[in-house]
Image (cartoon, rainbow, N blue to C red):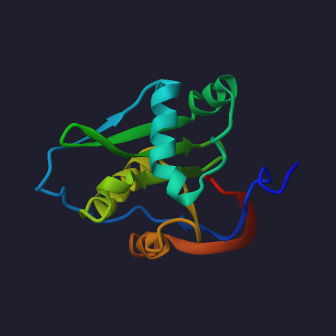
Amino acid sequence: MTEAAKPKILKTRVTLLEMTNRPVYSIPTPASFKLAIMSAKRISLPFYRFLYEQVGKPHHWFVHRNLSDEALAAAIHRDSVEIHVLYVDGSPAGFFELVLNQEPGVAEILYFGLVPEFQGRGLAKFFLSEAIVTAWMSSPEKVIIETNTLDSPRALQMYQRMGFNPVGFADAEIEAWL
């Protein structure tokens, strides 16, 4: 493999967070937009790939990036997976993906994020609150989420302000999304 063909490897610090108590407050819906959050039952693979790239590319998301159609469908069309899409003024603006009770008593917010054009508009906290409420609807003992140093620099702080507590750390290397 030539030097130019080698993938660029990025180092990151991963933080695992958990929430063991259901939140007692909710975040008000931003009034300056027409918003809809829709559960995407059996989301089409092209639409999922579009959302995954739009939200995840700036942060080098990798787990679902290079999966075959068959492997991706097997991952996201399981009964334990829910995908919810945020629409702002009619445009897809972000998504969250939940994995519910794959591990007994655990609901995981596997992916959460906004398309870059919709960041900085006061939507993230509201949308994360919706993800948390939806995760708790499956009656888990805890809700977990991961973030890393390649995510938004405000992600870890926002997760903690919303009630998540860090419970573990790991160093990782991932292939850059160029």
Residue 81 locus on image (x, y percent): 54, 36
Q: Is residue 65 above or below residue 6?
A: above
In-image side of 76 versus 31 (left or right): right
Q: Is residue 73 visible?
A: yes
Q: How many numbered marks have been drawn onto this rendered protein structure?
A: 0
In-image side of 161 versus 147 (left or right): left
Outermost residue toward the right?
A: 1
In-image side of 24 versus 13 (left or right): left
Q: Nearer the viewer, residue 62 or 104?
A: 62
When asked about the image quadrant of residue 142, the answer is bottom right
When asked about the image quadrant of residue 69, the answer is top right
Residue 96 locus on image (x, y percent): 44, 47
Q: Is residue 97 visible?
A: no
Residue beneath the point at 51% across and 57% down = 58
Residue beneath the point at 39% across and 47% down = 134
Residue 137 locus on image (x, y percent): 41, 46
Q: Is residue 137 above or below residue 151?
A: above
Residue beneath the point at 51% across and 43% down = 52
Residue beneath the point at 31% across and 66% down = 24
Residue 22 locus on image (x, y percent): 41, 61
Q: Nearer the viewer, residue 85 or 106?
A: 85
In-image side of 164 versus 14 (left or right): left
Q: Is residue 140 above or below residue 148?
A: above
